[in-house]
Image (cartoon, rainbow, N blue to C red):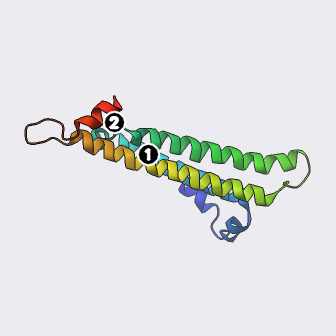
Amino acid sequence: MINGLLTLRGAWHKVAQDPILKFFVVAVTFYGMSTFEGPMLSIKSVNALSHYTDWTIGHVHGGTLGWNAFLAFGMFYWMFPRLYQTKLWSTKLCEWHFWLGTIGIFSYWLSMQWAGITQGLMWRAFDENGALAYPDFVETVT
């Protein structure tokens, strides 16, 4: 990830102008987030909190949608004009696609992280008798 972002050293001004480059930057950033979060989720104490929660689902989808989909769309937007020897039909639509996708995927990813941590903490909460503090929560999930 760092290598991917450092290739733009001295050329970050191009990211503001080129929507295709934005797709690649966001893709590499999601890749970095996923490759950091994956090993973190394998740590026993973190896994005890995250296992069977939406946190894991959010992690996988952040990597899939953020890394793979953004990289694929960036490649398509870059490749098709070159294949057909034309210009990109609409840079403005590409820009809209980028921002809607980025906001949507990041919102989804963030909400799943939040929900997963909340689920894990609620499953660990016990009352003074040793029963689950939120028994209705478990019944609705299973």
Q: Locate residue 74, reporting x and y percent.
A: 71, 50
Residue at x 90%, y 46% (from the top left corner): 84
Q: In terms of depth relative to the viewer, which is nearer, 46 or 135?
A: 135
Answer with left or right where residue 100 lies relative to residue 89. Answer: left
Answer with left or right where residue 59 lies relative to residue 118. Answer: right
- For disc 1, the neighbor class at 10 Å (few under 14, some 14 to 19, many from 20) is many
Q: Locate residue 113, reporting x and y percent.
A: 41, 48
Tag on residue 112?
1
Q: Separation of disc 2 and disc 1 at Cα?
A: 13 Å
Answer with left or right where residue 124 lies relative to residue 37. Answer: left
Q: Secondary structure at mark 2?
A: loop
Q: Locate residue 32, reporting x and y percent.
A: 51, 51
Disc 2 vs disc 1: which is toward the camera? 1
Q: Residue 32: in sight, yes or no? A: no
Q: Locate residue 124, reporting x and y percent.
A: 22, 41
Count of numbered circles in the view: 2
Q: In terms of depth relative to the viewer, which is nearer, 57 or 87?
A: 57
Q: Is residue 128 above or below residue 7?
A: above
Query: Which quadrant would the C terminus be assigned to in this image?
Result: top left
Q: Residue type at mark 2: give it.
A: His
The answer to which of marks 2 and 1 sits earlier in the sequence is 2
In the displayed image of the protein, which residue is found farthest to the top? 142
In the displayed image of the protein, which residue is found farthest to the right? 85
Q: Is residue 21 above or below residue 84?
A: below
Answer with left or right where residue 33 lies relative to residue 3. Answer: left
Residue at x 35%, y 34% (from the top left corner): 52
List the residue tagged with mark 2. Answer: 51
* Res 3 quadrant in image: bottom right
Q: Residue type at mark 1: give it.
A: Met
* Res 96 quadrant in image: bottom right
Residue at x 33%, y 36% (from the top left corner): 51
